[in-house]
Image (cartoon, helix red, strand yellow):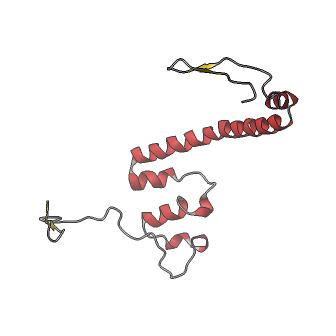
Amino acid sequence: AVVSTQSGHYDRGFEEGFPLHPGTYKLNREGAKWSDIDLAQIDNPRKLLRYFWSSSHMRWKYQPLNIVRNYFGSVTAMYFAYFGYYNFWLTIPAVVGTAVFIYGIFFSLTSQTVSEICDSGKNYLMCADCFIDGTCAATYLSD
């Protein structure tokens, strides 16, 4: 396809178009809520996925992998199954890391050793930082 510089439209663009997902995900009734629907109202797979997969009231439920497999295929369902499993097992190190971080903050605020080092001023000299031009600067422990 060639783009015309004057009109900005395609010359010999699309000859046919096919919708990626047929049907709508919205409910047939105006103003209906997803939490109040009857499953008999769901007449296409997009509505089924919208209800069981992407609505907020299903946030803590397992993924509907059979519905995903029927709609998107086995490879996509395996992708979401793997990442669901992966994210589930990453919650354990995330919780432990958050607990250690919070403990570290409270420990640094109440630790006598940390307060002695931070309040030491210019008493404890560490190794000097030397630069490429040959100058060296003293670094103190409290810095």
Residue 26 is left or right of residue 20, and the answer is right
Residue at 30 percent across and 65 percent down: it is 19
Q: Residue furthest bottom?
A: 30
The image quadrant of residue 110 is top right
Residue at 72 percent across and 24 percent down: it is 140
76 over 41 or under it: above or below = above
Residue 10 on image: x %, y %:
16, 66
Residue at 14 percent across and 70 percent down: it is 6
Query: Which quadrant, please, contains the C terminus?
Result: top right
Residue 82 is left or right of residue 7, and the answer is right
The image quadrant of residue 31 is bottom right
Residue 126 on image: x %, y %:
71, 19
Label total for image: 0
The image quadrant of residue 84 is top right
- Which residue is more in the foreground, 27 or 121? 121
Residue 85 on image: x %, y %:
56, 41
Residue 13 is left or right of residue 18, and the answer is left
- Which residue is more in the foreground, 34 or 67? 34
Residue at 82 percent across and 38 percent down: it is 109
Query: Which quadrant, please, contains the N terminus?
Result: bottom left
- Which residue is more in the foreground, 63 or 40? 63
- Which residue is more in the foreground, 122 or 94? 122
Residue 40 on image: x %, y %:
52, 72
